[in-house]
Image (cartoon, grey):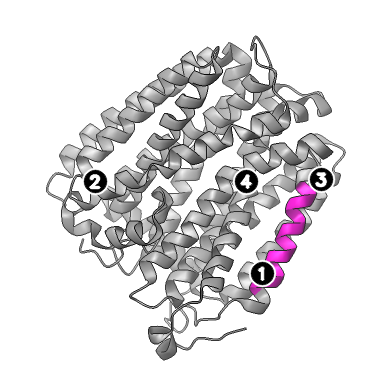
Amino acid sequence: MATLTDPARAQAHLSRFVVFLFAVTAGSSAGCLYYLQPLLHEISMDFSISTATAGLLIAVTQIGYLLGLALVVPLGDFVNRRRLVTGLLLVSCLALVAAGLMPAYGGLLTMVFAVGVSASAAQIVVPWAAAIAAPDERGAVVGNVMSGLLIGILLSRVVSGLVAEVGGWRAILFVAAGLQVLMAAAVWFRAPVARPAAAGSGQSYPQVLRSILTLVGTHDVLRHRMFLGGLSMAAFSCMWTAIAFLLAGAGDSHYSYSEAEIGLFGLAGVAGALVAPVVGKLADRGYLRHTQYGVWGAQIVGWLLLWAGGNEVVMLVIALLVFDFGVQGVQLANQTGVYSLDEQARSRLTTAYMVAYFAGGVIGSSVGGWAYQSGGWGLVCEIGIGSAIVGFAAWALFSWTEREHPVQGRAAHAELRAMVRGAGITSATTSSDAVRRSPS
């Protein structure tokens, strides 16, 4: 186990193994939020519950994650991150095993809530990587770690479907628990240690939490992006929750895919997200305002294609490509704006934005199950199209009110360029350290 003092940290470069370790840790933790998403139809039949009730599993997991973001992630500025992340990974393991053994739906809900809280380890690893990376590699390091987080989310559905096809829906929970144990051991024995950022600052934990509310009240750009991010994530969660029922043949759907086949549709989401660096390039050239219009427009088109794809699988795959590009593009553009606001408050900005983001996810997961049960795929798409139109209109209003803010110009994107070039990936590359040196 390596230890980095503050002076050494300024000179040392992280090894590829350490960067890979952080990336896999972030991905394995974030993936725990979505392992059950493509299996909701099978779970609903196993427990004899409605599609709307089954959809609550993802919502409750995200509620746990939301609380972890709000209450656990800020601890990373005060305590030893190696101990904190290792502890969360072990809690995740225990919760996953318990969830897999639960005979009743109520017990499963309780355990996935704990899984969600412990998954907040993903958002602790990101500022940890930023803190110990050398200044000239920080953008690429954080970009690579965030790519691991995003890939973990998107591939979790694919792996889940394949494992469930062989061993049933409970099997993926045990496989995930085993992975979390391995990651806990790897982090404990191989991750570097750095002095917590707020150690000796004199700030108490409650004071830091209160300062998050101050940031929200101070920065209108932050409030705008919180709304847009929450709206986009609500649409994303609504679609991926409902599509599990569509592809499984629930209701009046003519599809009838297996768990493995449903999981493979997640690959379309991966491909769509991998196109998102074009958003970073446009933002880097000073076209952030125009880019936001484009990605919200992509969401509108994506929803229209998803509607048509309710009866045509090729159209559905194309729709997933377009829709996920729009969602990841919104995320990149939002974070570009948020993290240019205050270079001294990146962890708290992360907490504020991501809490709103996953609050939208909670709402979307709940609405997705309810909408599919009530009105089928058509109602899901109608709600989605409406949300995308609201997002487009809201951005038109916010863009006008922010027209004099430096976040609209080129200066806010200097480090984003280095990150996109260094990592070559998606919207997730604009992490809590993505543009922290940009002027506000």
The reply to whether the magenta stretch includes residue 185 is yes
Name, please, the residue furthest toward the left.
Answer: 404
Q: Give the range drawn in magenta.
A: 173-187
Between 213 and 162, the one lying in front of the other is 162
Dot 3 amino acid type: Gly
Dot 4 amino acid type: Leu
Q: Residue at x 45, y 16 (%)?
A: 382
Q: Which class describes the residues within 10 Å of circle 1: few (<14), some (14-19), or many (20+)?
A: many
Q: Which of marks 1 and 2 is in front?
A: 2
Look at mark 2 in the image and give the residue it sits on. Answer: 282
Look at mark 1 in the image and give the residue it sits on. Answer: 86
Q: Which class describes the residues within 10 Å of circle 2: few (<14), some (14-19), or many (20+)?
A: some
Q: Distance between the residues labelled 3 and 4?
A: 14 Å
Q: Which residue is drawn at 29% across and 29% down?
A: 392
Label 3 vs 4, first from the N-terminus: 4
Dot 1 amino acid type: Thr
Which secondary structure dominates the residues rendered in magenta? helix
Task: Choose top left, top right, bottom left or bottom right for residue 11.
Answer: bottom left
Q: Which residue is drawn at 81% across and 38% down?
A: 166
Label 4 vs 1, first from the N-terminus: 4
Label 4 vs 2, first from the N-terminus: 4
Look at mark 3 in the image and give the residue it sits on. Answer: 100
Q: Which of marks 4 and 2 is in front?
A: 2
- Which element carries disc 4, helix, strand or loop? loop
Dot 2 amino acid type: Leu
Q: Can residue 223 be seen in this view?
A: no
- Which element carries disc 3, helix, strand or loop? helix
Label 3 vs 2, first from the N-terminus: 3
- Locate the C terminus and report the quarter of the image it occupies: bottom left
Left of 124 or right of it: where is 87?
A: right
